[in-house]
Image (cartoon, rainbow, N blue to C red):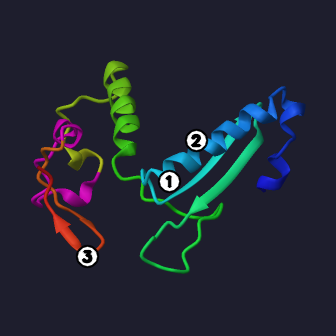
Amino acid sequence: MIENLTAKPEALGMNPQRLQRVDALIREGMAANWYPAAAYAVLRHGQIALQGTIGKPQPSTPNSVTNADTLFDMASLTKTVTAILLLHAVEDGLLTLGQRITEFLPETVGTALSGISLRHLATHTGGAGFQRGNRSTKPS
């Protein structure tokens, strides 16, 4: 439970006035329309020193409210982490970029996806479409 992880900033050796700069920066980003909503936490030694939420996750929905349970569409933010993990696995000899996804997803054998390799996925050239909301698109 989050409440059990929360500590006073001073008890964690943190300056509460400096931590408030985090909140101010988040609010500045909202005012500049960089994002419609945010949820944030600053931790030290596994304890939460500051946490907060702001904005509407669905600006077009009047009653939408951001809280600790709000799920955000991370979109392309995960690509960086995925690329790093993939390249570490390649470097460690656990995977090769030429491996076909059929090795990991046997249900793709004999389908249009069976020719896609990890290299295709990593470079977004696999040709598999994706759906977001009511739009269906193909990666470029």
Q: Which residues are magenta?
A: 105-123
Seen at 25% across and 55% down, the residue is 106
Q: CA distance from mark 3 to mark 1?
A: 29 Å
Quadrant housing residue 132: bottom left
> Which of the numbered marks, if any, corresponds to residue 31?
1
Q: Residues within 10 Å of mark 1 (few under 14, many from 20)?
A: few
> Which of the numbered marks, if any, corresponds to residue 134?
3
Q: CA distance from mark 1 to mark 2?
A: 10 Å
* SS label for mark 1: helix
Quadrant housing residue 12: top right
Q: Earlier in the sequence, mark 1 or mark 2?
A: 2
Q: Is residue 134 magenta?
A: no
* SS label for mark 2: helix
Closer to viewer: mark 3 or mark 1: 1
In the rendered image, residue 87, in percent from the top left (x then y), is placed at: 32, 26
Closer to viewer: mark 1 or mark 2: 1
Which amino acid is tagged 3?
Asn
* SS label for mark 3: loop
Q: CA distance from mark 3 to mark 2?
A: 33 Å
Task: Pick the quarter of the image with the N terminus.
Answer: bottom right
In the rendered image, residue 63, in percent from the top left (x then y), is placed at: 55, 80
Seen at 17% across and 60% down, the residue is 129
State how many labels appear.
3
Q: Residue beneath label 2, please? A: 25
Q: Is residue 119 magenta?
A: yes
Seen at 62% across and 48% down, the residue is 40
Query: Relative to the observer, which residue lies in front, 135 or 101?
Result: 135
